[in-house]
Amino acid sequence: MEDLSTSRKKINELDQQLVKLLEERFNVVTEVNDYKLKHDLPVLDAKREQQVLTKVAGLTNRSDLLPYLQEIYQEIMYRSREYQKSQRKD
């Protein structure tokens, strides 16, 4: 096993990548929200969210991590909905 500082450095590098990816995801969330507004669609699409969770299950080979990954994605989707709501001028 590597030393703690090396592992933490790797985590810091991964965190930088994750933040950039999440920023990109929120940029696309804005596009989705714009579409939903133009077509009078609600923020929540429960069917789509279930599809995302199912997709996540298919992307990992680590069944021990699956519940944690799905919880993370549930939180990401919740925050995405909250962000969409904050962008609406209702």
Image (spheres, rainbow, N blue to C red):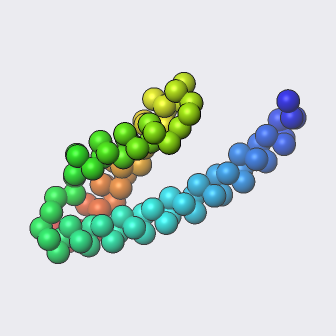
Q: What residue is drawn where x is 29% and y is 62%? A: 84
Number of callouts: 0
Is residue 70 visible in the rendered structure shown here? yes
User: Residue 30 placed where, x, y %?
Assistant: 34, 69
Q: What residue is drawn where x is 86% and y is 35%? A: 2
Q: What residue is drawn where x is 22% and y is 46%? A: 46
Q: Which of 58 and 43 is in front in this view?
A: 58
User: Residue 21 placed where, x, y %?
Assistant: 54, 60
Q: Is residue 84 above or below residue 78?
A: below
Q: Quadrant of the N terminus?
A: top right
Is residue 86 visible in the rendered structure shown here? no
Q: Which residue lies furthest to the left in this view?
A: 40
Q: What residue is drawn where x is 27% and y is 50%? A: 48
Q: In this view, does 88 lie above or below 64?
A: below
Q: Is residue 41 above or below residue 44?
A: below
Q: Quadrant of residue 39?
A: bottom left
Q: Quadrant of the C terminus?
A: bottom left
User: Residue 15 placed where, x, y %?
Assistant: 64, 52
Q: Quadrant of residue 50?
A: top left
Q: Nearer the viewer, residue 10 or 53?
A: 53
